[in-house]
């Protein structure tokens, strides 16, 4: 039956689009890799053919900010539903955050999550370890076991992991700088947001605007600036998650110009939704941290994404059971909503509107995330030798976003309800296998594989004054 001269999959007639530009080419995939990109006359014959005429063939999206919730919170999502949603959305790799139960802060906790993912994942995945003051001694072991990077919660959110003391953050950065991995940061100032929240509650405020006010711009700006100072001092590579403030953009631009080893992501909700529109129930569904801000932020964030100051588009995919979003007090309402399935459609809509080029979208959705987390050029580009992780996009597909159609089946709500979109993924290919076609997700639990980072050599700074250096017995400079 098996003919040795046939490759696994041939994608015909499409336009390949990388961050550097587009060109007509057939794409052949074999044994999980791209083996040919070029003129159809020279393409190999294949067991399976996918017609991409009139469509774009782009590297699959890499969503570096998702919360799959398993282990411990499977009433919200699990590895099967979360990765099926990703496949439906043209996402071929997700990076999963460590605020599960247990948190991913030890080797047994990492192994428990890895086993759950290995059984169920429909797309590839990387697993974050937690940077917390209670697990500083676990960072090296977690790195050795293959975490994709670390996550630091400077601002309090789902999972109620307290923000570490700044001293612990400094020591954690010293350690991670020497390991060479990247540390993603939820950059909000916890004491400030708790203080303001307390003041709002004492005044009887219980509404979406009070939540926004408790986490106003300066709460994010302060934590961003502190993260930059500590990254620049230690050489720890950082990634700022869910940037929501236009006022952060010049701060990021300045830091990058100085050579701070940082990358930044934003999410579709900060580009397409505005606090002014989120009254009543819409505010409950859209509640997340940091909050969706006033409309005037949108243009600055989109322009920063287009010019590369903001590197990546992620989603902060954060599913919840619907009853957790509908508690009587706004303050008790769970923060976050699913996003991994709708991101590509929303971002292609911005491309259709002329706000981004398709090449800029490909950079933000795939190439830049791959570079930031040590997966490039194995991922993030359509070229021979790369992994066969692809999305096939119909730029003219029109649709309306509805929560009831989502594959996050315990979390079928979206703040984008009713939004018209232009452009959509019509097929998703993971390691050469078609895992989604025309909206239908193939049943392939366990097909996704764990991704481990291959980072540039570590470049730690100020080594003479790290806590570890000072505590060495021979370190007695003044005695
Ligand atoms: Zn998050």
Image (tube, rainbow, N blue to C red):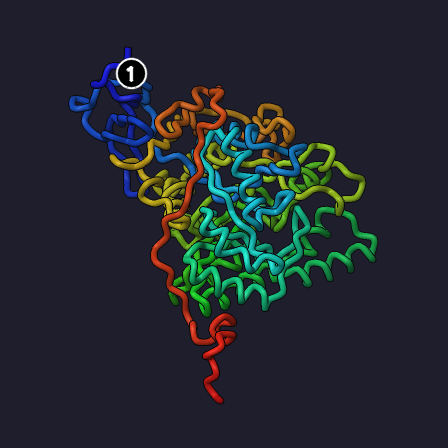
Residue at the limit of the structure toward the left, as seen here: 42
Residue 50 horizontal/vertical position (percent): 33, 19
Residue at 66% in and 37% down: 73
Q: Is residue 210 left or right of residue 255?
A: right
Residue 353 horizontal/vertical position (percent): 44, 37
Against 230, residue 29 (above or below) is: above
Residue at 48% in and 65% down: 174
Against 468, residue 278 (above or below) is: above
Residue at the limit of the structure toward the top, as seen here: 1
- SS state under label 1: strand
| Residue 245 visible in rendering | no
Q: Quadrant of residue 408?
A: top right
Residue at 77% in and 39% down: 327
Residue 366 vs residue 72, the one in the foreground: 72
Q: Is residue 202 left or right of residue 148?
A: right
Which residue position is annotated with label 1? Answer: 47
Residue at the limit of the structure toward the bottom, as seen here: 479
Q: Is mark 1 within 8 Å of ligand 1?
A: no
* Screen quadrant of the N terminus: top left
Residue 87 horizontal/vertical position (percent): 47, 28
Q: Is residue 296 left or right of residue 333?
A: left
Against 90, residue 373 (above or below) is: below
Q: Quadrant of residue 14?
A: top left
Q: Dot 1, how many residues are within 10 Å of its Cα: few (below 14), some (14-19), or many (20+)?
A: few
Residue 380 vs residue 179, the one in the foreground: 179
Residue 105 vs residue 240, the one in the foreground: 105
Number of marks in the image? Answer: 1
Against 47, residue 431 (above or below) is: below
């Amino acid at each position: 039956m098996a003919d040795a001269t046939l490759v696994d999959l041939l994608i015909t007639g499409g336009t390949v689009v990388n961050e550097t530009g587009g060109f007509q080419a057939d794409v052949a995939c074999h044994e999980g890799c791209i083996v040919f990109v070029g003129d159809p006359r020279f393409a190999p014959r294949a067991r399976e053919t996918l017609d991409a005429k009139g469509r774009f063939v782009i590297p699959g999206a890499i969503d570096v900010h998702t919360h799959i919730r398993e282990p411990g919170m499977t009433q919200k999502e699990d590895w099967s539903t979360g990765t099926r949603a990703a496949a439906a959305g043209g996402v071929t790799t997700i990076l999963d955050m460590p605020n599960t139960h247990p948190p991913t802060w030890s080797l047994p906790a990492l192994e428990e999550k890895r086993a759950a993912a290995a059984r169920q994942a429909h797309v590839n995945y990387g697993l974050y370890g937690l940077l917390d003051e209670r697990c500083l001694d676990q960072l090296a072991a977690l790195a050795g076991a293959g975490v994709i990077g670390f996550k630091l919660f400077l601002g309090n959110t789902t999972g109620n992991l307290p923000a570490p003391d700044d001293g612990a953050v400094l020591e954690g950065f010293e350690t991670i700088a020497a390991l060479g991995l990247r540390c993603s940061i939820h950059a909000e100032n916890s004491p400030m947001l708790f203080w303001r929240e307390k003041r709002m509650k004492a005044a009887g405020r219980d509404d979406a605007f009070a939540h926004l006010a408790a986490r106003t711009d300066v709460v994010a700006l302060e934590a961003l600036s502190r993260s930059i100072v500590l990254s620049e001092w230690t050489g720890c590579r950082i990634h700022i998650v869910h940037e929501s403030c236009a006022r952060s953009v010049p701060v990021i631009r300045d830091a990058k110009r100085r050579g701070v080893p940082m990358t930044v992501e934003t999410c579709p909700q900060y580009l397409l939704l505005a606090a002014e529109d989120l009254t009543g129930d819409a505010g409950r569904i859209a509640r997340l941290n940091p909050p969706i801000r006033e409309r005037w932020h949108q243009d600055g964030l989109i322009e920063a994404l287009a010019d590369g100051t903001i590197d990546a588009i992620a989603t902060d995919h954060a599913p919840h059971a619907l009853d957790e979003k509908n508690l009587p007090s706004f303050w008790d309402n769970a923060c976050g909503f699913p996003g991994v399935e709708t991101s590509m459609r929303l971002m292609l809509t911005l491309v259709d509107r002329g706000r981004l080029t398709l090449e800029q979208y490909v950079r933000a959705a795939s190439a830049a995330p791959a570079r930031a987390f040590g997966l490039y050029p194995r991922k993030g580009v359509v070229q021979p030798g790369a992994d066969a992780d692809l999305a096939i996009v119909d730029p003219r597909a029109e649709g309306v976003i509805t929560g009831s159609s989502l594959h996050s089946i315990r979390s079928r709500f979206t703040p984008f309800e009713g939004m018209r979109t232009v452009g959509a993924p019509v097929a998703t290919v993971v390691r050469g296998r078609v895992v989604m076609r025309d909206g239908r997700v193939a049943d392939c639990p366990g097909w996704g594989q764990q991704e481990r980072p291959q980072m540039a050599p570590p470049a730690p700074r100020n080594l003479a004054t790290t806590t570890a250096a000072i505590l060495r017995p021979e370190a007695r400079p003044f005695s």
